[in-house]
């Protein structure tokens, strides 16, 4: 799969212009709506097909993080035959009271699945809880890694990030001449 073409397609579908308030509270005239690629069945499949080779060979289970990682994990499970877990942000307070819904994780290698990794906080929190329940967690596979390249919480938690695209890939796709020959903006408020 051509990463540049995939980056251009994801960027074209997900980069919105207008007036947006970001999670930080700042205002931006651009916003990257990751759910637009996740809700497009064909684009979601192409992103997942590019993720398949990144899944470690020792993975026993795929753990889709709530909310964005769940559709990716489901499609990856279909493409690979690996069982899928749905990992909540916090354990539900009723029924089974589980954080991870699906197969038993004790003693099994769980590869986490996320749509966008920014700081890695949600991945680290999920890995910590899964590890306390007996899972082996050492990787997260994501569609987009938007970390700035510096050592972060996932390095400290010994979790390798395996990404199809980076924020730089999306910016590079956007910075190429558009159909009218105009250069597109080179930065984005990716949330």
Image: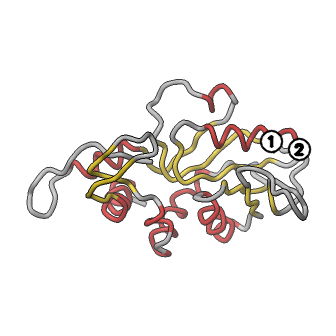
User: Element under label 1?
Assistant: helix
Per the model, the C-alpha gap separating discs 1 and 2 is 6 Å
Mark 2 surroundings within 10 Å by alpha-carbon count, few (fewer than 14), some (14 through 19), many (20 or more): some
User: Which of the pair 22/40 is nearer the observer?
Assistant: 22
- The colour scheme used to paint the residues is secondary structure
Tell me which residue sits at (90%, 61%) in the image: 96
Residue 94 image offset from top left, x and y in percent = 87, 61
User: Element under label 2?
Assistant: loop
Left or right of 43 in this view: 78: right
Residue 187 image offset from top left, x and y in percent = 28, 43
Left or right of 143 in this view: 78: right
Q: Name the residue under label 1.
A: 129
Contact? badges 1 and 2 (CB < 8 Å): yes
Tell me which residue sits at (26%, 58%) in the image: 18
Tell me which residue sits at (18%, 51%) in the image: 184
Q: Name the residue under label 2.
A: 133
């Amino acid at each position: 799969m051509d990463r540049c073409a995939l980056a251009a397609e994801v960027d074209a579908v997900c980069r919105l212009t207008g007036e947006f308030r970001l999670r930080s509270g700042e205002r931006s005239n651009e916003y990257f709506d990751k759910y637009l690629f996740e809700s497009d069945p064909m684009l979601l499949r192409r992103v997942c097909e590019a993720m398949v080779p990144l899944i470690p060979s020792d993975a026993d289970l795929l753990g889709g993080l709530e909310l964005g990682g769940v559709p990716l994990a489901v499609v990856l499970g279909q493409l690979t035959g690996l069982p899928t877990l749905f990992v909540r942000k916090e354990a539900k307070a009723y029924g089974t009271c589980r954080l991870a819904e699906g197969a038993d994780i004790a003693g099994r290698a769980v590869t986490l699945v996320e749509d966008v990794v920014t700081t890695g906080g949600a991945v680290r929190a999920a890995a910590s809880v899964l590890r306390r329940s007996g899972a082996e967690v050492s990787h997260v596979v994501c569609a987009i890694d938007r970390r700035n390249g510096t050592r972060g919480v996932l390095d400290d938690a010994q979790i390798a990030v395996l990404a199809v695209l980076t924020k730089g890939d999306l910016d590079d796709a956007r910075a190429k001449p558009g159909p009218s020959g105009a250069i597109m903006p080179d930065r984005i408020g990716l949330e």
